[in-house]
Amino acid sequence: MATTFLTKSAMGVEQVEPALTPPTIKAVLPQKAKLGSSKSKTRKREIPEGLWTKCPSCTTMVYDKELDENLKVCPKCQFHFPIGSRERIHSLVETCTFEEMDAGMTSVDALKFTSYKSKLERDRKATNLRDAVITGIGKIGTHQVALGVMDFTFLGGSMGSVVGEKLTRLIERGTEGRWPVIIISTSGGARMQEGALSLMQMAKTSGALAYHAQARLPYLSVLTNNSYGGVMASYAALGDLILAEPAAMIGFAGPRVIKDTTHAELPPGFQTAEFLLDHGLIDAIVPRKEAKEQFVKYLDYFANGKK
């Protein structure tokens, strides 16, 4: 212990007395003991991937198995999740009646567009599809139909030469067989990597539908989220009946592009299926779970009119 000496004057006499420097004492407070075991029981549980999906509309956590059984429709708020083309076909046609057409047809990089080949390969592996549409002949109820279903997961459902050719062949096959044509669209528009070749598909599919109409055969166009661009500007808008899923976004260009071009305030929700139904562009909104039943009713109506 360190010792120092202090000098002070007392009654005129100098006295020297020792002074002690007190030691520094650190106060140590007792910590409150934790309840339970050393591992906290309130730790947030990790949810394994592939079991639950959060609905973007109502934020409800939906069990994936329940979501699949409900055709990818939220059981609480009826939000329509994207659905694959094969799942949609399976939900519509009678068992073992669908015969796919042109299954081996694939796109080529005719314009030598940067990274187009790699994107095609990537999406073929990821989706197990050859391109953005599946076409074929099948039965819905008692009606034989020519059915085409697009898939947004393959390059945004864009319409290139293969999509246009497959749909044109489907429509022509429907005309030859005197069958109704149903095309379910979901697309961002024409495929930019194929340039003018993709734009030609707009005229080709529209021409095939003109011959189909001359034969007085019905064509049902079904618009799902999203339906935009060259697809909406061609065959998707030419149906005898134009149907849509709830809350589907439909238009030629996106809202931001339209606003920047027109410099005008746009009505809220002006590209939703509900707004377009109110303004006469589409004929009906058909929820996914009711689609098969509704299609049969429409086809029955057309068949009776034809008789």
Image (cartoon, rainbow, N blue to C red):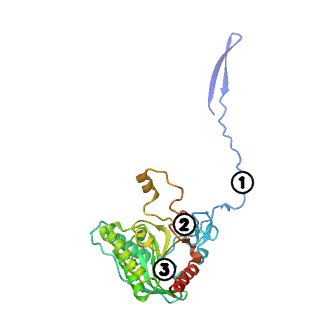
- Asked if the residues shown at circle 2 and circle 1 are in contact, with their CB atoms under 8 angstroms apart, the answer is no
Residue 153 showing in the rendered view: no
Indicate which label's residue lies in the foreground, 2 or 1: 2
Q: Nearer the viewer, residue 116 or 110?
A: 110
Binning the other alpha carbons within 10 Å of mark 3 as few (below 14), some (14 to 19) or many (20 upward) gives some
- Where disc 1 sits, the SS reads loop
Q: Is residue 23 left or right of residue 133?
A: right
Residue under numbered circle 2: 277
Coordinates of residue 226 in the picture (x, y in percent) = 48, 67
Q: Nearer the viewer, residue 4 or 61?
A: 61
Q: CA distance from mark 1 to mark 3?
A: 59 Å
Q: Which mark is residue 156?
A: none
Hey, what amino acid is under mark 1?
Answer: Ala
Q: Is residue 54 above or below residue 262?
A: below
First-in-chain label (3 vs 2): 3
Coordinates of residue 209 in the picture (x, y in percent) = 40, 78
Residue under numbered circle 3: 86
Hey, what amino acid is under mark 3?
Answer: Arg
Identify the residue at image location x=54%, y=66%: 277
Q: Is residue 29 left or right of residue 129?
A: right
Coordinates of residue 6 in the picture (x, y in percent) = 64, 21
Indicate which label's residue lies in the foreground, 1 or 3: 3
**Quadrant of the rendered structure where residue 128 is?**
bottom left
Q: Is residue 261 left or right of residue 287?
A: left
Residue 79 showing in the rendered view: yes
Q: CA distance from mark 2 to mark 1?
A: 65 Å
Hey, what amino acid is under mark 2?
Answer: Leu
Identify the residue at image location x=29%, y=72%: 109
Indicate which label's residue lies in the foreground, 3 or 2: 2
Q: Nearer the viewer, residue 243 or 188?
A: 243
